């Protein structure tokens, strides 16, 4: 199974704030990423907690505990945020607090300090750095340029 360094763009879990539904969704997302040793250890620990909760007669006890809240709001959110694409974050959608996923930073325009072009032919020969191509329709593609060669990082159309 090929694991990605970065999470995708958009929703991972939507329509719920229920810990019993969020934690498994975020675990599934985390398990599909290339995690550090520490991150893998934490994800495994949380997965064991979930598995034990599902196997026991009082399964909701974990999901209602402070530990589950910490695992969700601190550990899993931090891990997934560590794997967000450049200029993205993992968290609640700005317009819907029950839609969790990877979203472009609202302050992206101020954070970006690379080269912004309307056509990739405008990239100077031999340029190295980030290049943001914004089409006349508002579509955006972020490239990493190395000696004039462009490598797509992400695109929003």
Image: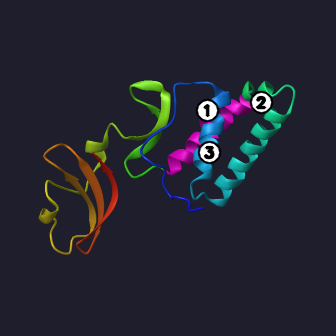
Residue 94: assigned label: none
Residue in view at x 28 percent, y 65 percent: 129
Residue 22: assigned label: 1
Q: What is the x, y in percent for residue 104? A: 36, 42
Instruction: Tell me the residue that label 3 is attached to.
Output: 28
Residue in view at x 23 percent, y 46 percent: 139
Graded by Cα atoms within 10 Å as few (under 14), some (14 to 19) or many (20 or more), the crowding at tag 3 reads: some
Q: Is residue 34 above or below residue 45?
A: below
The magenta segment: 66-83
Residue 62: assigned label: 2
Question: Is residue 75 in the magenta section?
Answer: yes
- Dot in front, 1 or 2: 1
Helix, strand, or loop for circle 2? helix
Task: Please indicate whether residue 43 sits to the left or right of residue 7 in the image.
Answer: right
Residue in view at x 62 percent, y 51 percent: 31
* Residues under numbered marks 3 and 2 in contact, where contact means CB atoms less than 8 Å apart: no
């Amino acid at each position: 199974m090929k694991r990605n360094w970065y999470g995708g763009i958009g929703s991972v879990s939507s329509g719920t704030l229920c810990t019993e539904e969020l934690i498994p969704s975020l675990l599934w997302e985390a398990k599909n990423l290339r995690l550090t040793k520490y991150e893998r250890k934490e994800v495994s620990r949380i997965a064991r907690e979930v598995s034990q909760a599902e196997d026991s007669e009082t399964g909701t006890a974990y999901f209602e505990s402070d530990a589950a809240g910490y695992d969700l709001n601190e550990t899993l959110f931090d891990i997934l945020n560590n794997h967000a694409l450049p200029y993205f974050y993992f968290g609640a959608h700005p317009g819907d607090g029950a839609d969790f996923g990877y979203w472009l930073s609202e302050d992206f325009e101020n954070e970006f300090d690379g080269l912004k072009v309307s056509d990739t032919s405008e990239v100077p020969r031999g340029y190295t750095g980030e290049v943001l191509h914004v089409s006349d329709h508002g579509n955006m593609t972020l490239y990493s340029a190395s000696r004039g060669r462009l490598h797509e990082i992400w695109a929003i159309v």
